[in-house]
Amino acid sequence: MLSEKTIRIVKEITPLVAANAETITRRFYERMFEANPEVKVFFNQAHQHTGGQQKALAGAICAYFTHIDNPAVLMPAVELIAQKHVSLGIKAEHYPIVGSNLLGAIGDVMGDAATPEIVEAVGEAYGFLADIFIGREGAIYEEQASAPGGWNGTRTFVVAKKVPESDIVTSFYLKPEDEGPLPPFKPGQYITVHIDHPHTPTSPRNYSLSDCASQPHYRISVKREERLAADAPDGLISNHLHDGIEEGHTIQLGPPCGEFTVDPNEVAKPVVLIAGGIGVTPLLSMAKSIIHANPDAQVTFIQAARNSKVQAFADELASLSQAGSNVRTKVIYDAPLPGDVEDGKCDGTGFVTTDLLRDWTPFADADFYFCGPKPFMQNMHACLQELGVDEHRVRYEFFGPKEELVTA
C-alpha cells in the first residue's frame, strides 16, 4: 500500500500537474525516445504526431493522481491499458524505462517545484501502479499461452481470402500457417498485426475481429486510413494491407486482446449496438456471436455511415434481421448519394439522435455498446445521458482521455 505521506503529497500537487499534464507528457516522450529509442517501436507515430498519445497519457496521469487514495476506481482503465500493453508485447522490464523518463519530465517541466520529497512521492506512486500493471499483464500473457491453440508473441497466418467490403474497407480472412487450432476470442476483441513495412518502420497495429467468434478463421476489416494531419503520411499499415497484401501472403499476428467485449452466452437483457464508420467491426462480431449463441436474443443494431460507397457490410447487416426473430437493424446515411434513399440502401438520413434512440430502442432496459470516430462517440454518450441510461449499462471503446468524451 502507498504511504499516507505519498498520498498526501500527490493529492497536493495534482492541480499543478493537471495544469501542466500535456507539457509533461510531451517532454516525457521526447526524453524517452532520445534515451531509449528501442521502445519507439511500441508507439504509433501518427498518434504521436497529432498529440493523441500525449493527451491520453496526460488524462491517465491526472485520473491516477486524482484517485490516488482510491485506486479501485481505476481498475476498468487498468484493464483497458493492460490489454493494450499485452497486444504490443510490453513487459515488466519496460516499466523502469517509463518511470525514470516520467520523473525526469516532471522535473524538467516543474523545475524547482519538483522537490526531492515530491519526486520521491511520485516515484513511489508510479511504482505502486506499475506493479498492478505488471501483475495483470503477466496474468493475461499466461491466459493467452494456456488457451487451446493459444500463443504469446507472434504467430504466422496466411491470408486465405481478401474481400472488398466498400470503397474504403477490405476484409482479410486469416488462418494459421501451421494449420493448428485457433484460440477462442471474446466478441469485440482485436488482434495485433505486425508488419515489416518496406519503407518506413512503424509500430504494430490493432484491428478488431469482425466475424462471429465460432468461425474457423480470424477476420479483420481494415479501413484505408488517410493522413491525420496535412504534413503526415497516409496510414502506413492500412494502405500497405490494402495495396501490398494479397491472398496467399503471410502476416504475423499477436493473440486476441481487449476488454470491450460481450459474452454471447450471458446476454439476458436487450442489447443495442450503435456503429459509426469503421466502428462497425467489433459490433458486428458481437451481433453475429450473440445471435449464433442465442437466436432468441433481443438485438438492435444501428449503423451510421456517410453513404453506400463507404458503408461496409451492407449485405451482412441486412441478413442479421433474418437470423433472429428479435433482431432489428437500421442504417443511417449523413451524406447520401443520389439514389441511396430511393433504392432503399439506407433507412434514414442525418445523424443518430436522442429522439431516434428514444423511439427505436428499448433504452429503459437495454445494455448499449457503441464505437466509432470521436465526434460520433461524443454524440452517442450525450444522447444516452439525455435519455438517463445508467453508466453501468453503457460500454464503448474510445482512444483518449475519457474527459474528452464526457464533457463534450
Image: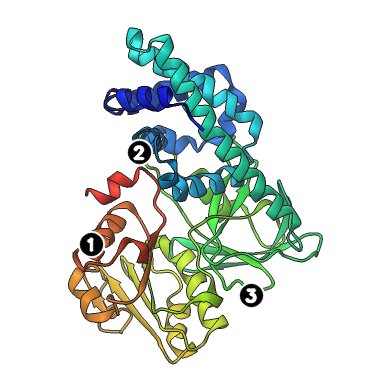
Furthest-top residue in view?
A: 112
- Above or below residue 39? Residue 105 is above
What percent of the width, then of the height, locates residue 10?
Answer: 37, 25
Residue beneath the point at 65% across and 36% down: 91
Q: CA distance from mark 2 to mark 1?
A: 32 Å
Q: Which of label 1 and label 3 is nearer to you? A: 1
Amino acid type of the residue that numbered disc 3 sits on in the rendered structure = Ser
What percent of the width, then of the height, locates residue 26?
Answer: 39, 25
Amino acid type of the residue that numbered disc 2 sits on in the rendered structure = Ala
Residue beneath the point at 53% across and 18% down: 34
Instruction: Tell me the number on the disc at residue 214.
Output: 3
Q: Disc 2 vs disc 1: Cβ atoms closer than 8 Å?
A: no
- Above or below residue 267? Residue 155 is above
The crowd level at tag 1 (other Cα within 10 Å; few <14, some 14-19, many 20+) is: some
Residue at mark 1: 385
Q: Which of label 2 and label 1 is nearer to you? A: 1
